[in-house]
Image: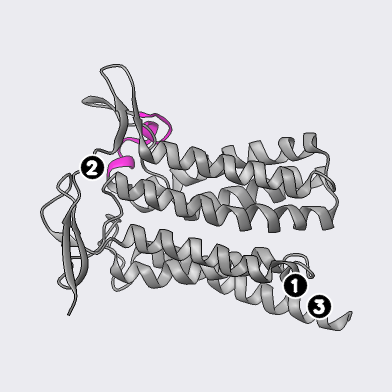
Amino acid sequence: MFELTILWTHSPYIFSSDFISVRYYSLFFALGIIFVYVKTIIKLSKDINPKILDDVFIPCILFMLLFSRIFHCLFYEFTYYSTNPIEIFLPFRLSPFEFTGYQGLSSHGGFVGFIFSFLIFYRKKMKFNLSIKFLDTVFYYSIILIGFIRLGNFFNSEILGKACTNSLCIIFPLFDSVPRYPVQLYESLTYFVIYIVLSFFREKIEAVPGRLLLLTVLFVSISRFLLEFLKDIQSDINIGVLTMGQLLTIPIVLISIIAFLVLNGIGKKYR
């Protein structure tokens, strides 16, 4: 059986000083956001006023970050933040004082926050068909964003895999000395593959508005659910056999499947 163990000693910081530090995670996150924004503007500028795109996109990103933070604190570090709720919204810990940045972010929270803000507050800025086209476009390009985020998690030595006894194993000395599956890399690579595969069929998929959105969410969610089996426990809430990531993914998968079947049924009805 193939086995290779690598000691990952790379610093999570691009630059670090007594006054400011910049992590690779921050760089990858920023590059992902910029990629989604630029590609969305290029794709939709002929159909939607760029000013409207800005008015919708930027607040949705802010809500995405807010919900990402809240979900992480509630579902992954509830024990700590239930007694320190003010720190949910602060980039540092109070006792003892430590600048941490917003390291705890949940992708499920980001998904809910983006959809919530778009549907509740900003959909009225666009006609319905353009709203769906906007969501199709943003979520498709967001596959690259979440792929970049997992690369950032790898550099941060976080969201670690379970102990590894065969295959490619990596030791993260910033965390412990246990060889582990590099599940962050598996997940990132999987998302990039999904992006490429969908690109080959994108024109046909987009013939039905909303289908690209649902297929993107469905493929990413199923991949996330399966790869969670290789991850170590991330949450301090004991939920039994499934991980917290899997528990939060299940309703998204079910809703996506139902919506996809309904959408296909409507499409066939009017063909």
The residue stretch that appears in magenta? 80-91
Q: Earlier in the sequence, mark 2 or mark 3?
A: 2
The amino acid marked with disc number 2 is: His
**Depth check: 18 or 119 in front?**
18
**Element carrying mark 2:** loop
**Element carrying mark 3:** helix
Label 3, residues with CA under 10 Å away: few <14, some 14-19, many ≥20: few
Residue beneath disc 3 = 266
Q: Say which residue appears at 35% left-offset and 59% top-offset.
A: 185
The amino acid marked with disc number 1 is: Lys
Q: Is residue 170 above or below residue 62?
A: below
Residue beneath disc 2 = 10
**Depth check: 175 or 197 in front?**
197
Marks 2/1: CA–CA distance: 43 Å
Image coords of residue 45 (percent x, y): 80, 43
Q: Say which residue appears at 49% left-offset and 55% top-offset.
A: 108
Marks 2/3: CA–CA distance: 52 Å
The answer to whether mark 2 and mark 3 are in CB contact below 8 A is no
Label 2, residues with CA under 10 Å away: few <14, some 14-19, many ≥20: few
Q: Earlier in the sequence, mark 1 or mark 3?
A: 1
Q: Is residue 86 above or below residue 250?
A: above
Image coords of residue 213 (percent x, y): 66, 63
Residue beneath disc 1 = 204
The answer to whether mark 1 and mark 3 are in CB contact below 8 A is no
